[in-house]
Amino acid sequence: MKILAVDFGDARTGLACCDRTEFLASPVGVIHDYHLESTAQKVAHAVEEFEAKMVVVGNPINLDGTHGPRAQKCEKFAAYLETLTHVPVCLWDERGTTVSAHGYLNEMDTRGKKRKEVVDELAAAIILQNYLDYRHNNPQAEEKP
């Protein structure tokens, strides 16, 4: 099943998608938008474009496990997106994904404007790959418990 991942941000929202075998997550683009509703509409269009049957939205839970303002905004985004797409939308703990994305970009010596352009879609790919690995290791689970 094709799954679309979303790294929702205030100005840039990264997207990633996997192949039908759920083996590999790949970055597929960035949405530049400042509004939750219009961003969700653009993501809904991407769900159709990529023929995704599920969406995973990164949820930036605090390190202590609490849900701060950013996580609450992502939860609101995910709920709204689900009404637009009519496919399951799963929130996935994204703690550390942006840091990991920056680490990968450091290793590849990606700097400046190019770095800013790709970090969000790379973070979405990391979110999705983590989710795919979870599904692979827990085949009985449809979504995260």
Image (cartoon, rainbow, N blue to C red):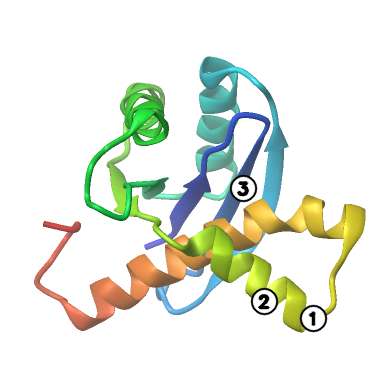
Q: Is residue 62 above or below residue 139?
A: above
Q: Residue at 19% of width from left, 57% of height from top?
A: 143
Residue in the image at 62% along x and 67% along y: 101
* Disc 2 element: helix
Whole-number angstrom distance, CA of label 3 to CA of label 1: 19 Å
Q: What residue type is labelled 2?
A: Tyr
Disc 1 residue type (three-letter): Met
Mark closer to the observer (2, 3): 2
Residue 57 higher or lower than 45, as above or below: below
Image quadrant in which you'd find residue 39: top right
Q: Which mark is residue 104?
A: 2
State the image coordinates of residue 17 (x, y, percent, origin top left): 53, 59
Label 2 CA crowd tier, 10 Å (few <14, some 14–19, many 20+): some
Horizontal and vertical percent position of residue 34:
66, 21
Q: Name the residue under label 3.
A: 14
Q: Quadrant of the C terminus?
A: bottom left
Disc assigned to residue 108:
1
Q: Quadrant of residue 63?
A: bottom left
Horizontal side of 11 relative to 45 (left or right) equals right
Who's the residue at 56% across and 59% down the image?
98
Select label 3 or label 1 by which is in front: 1
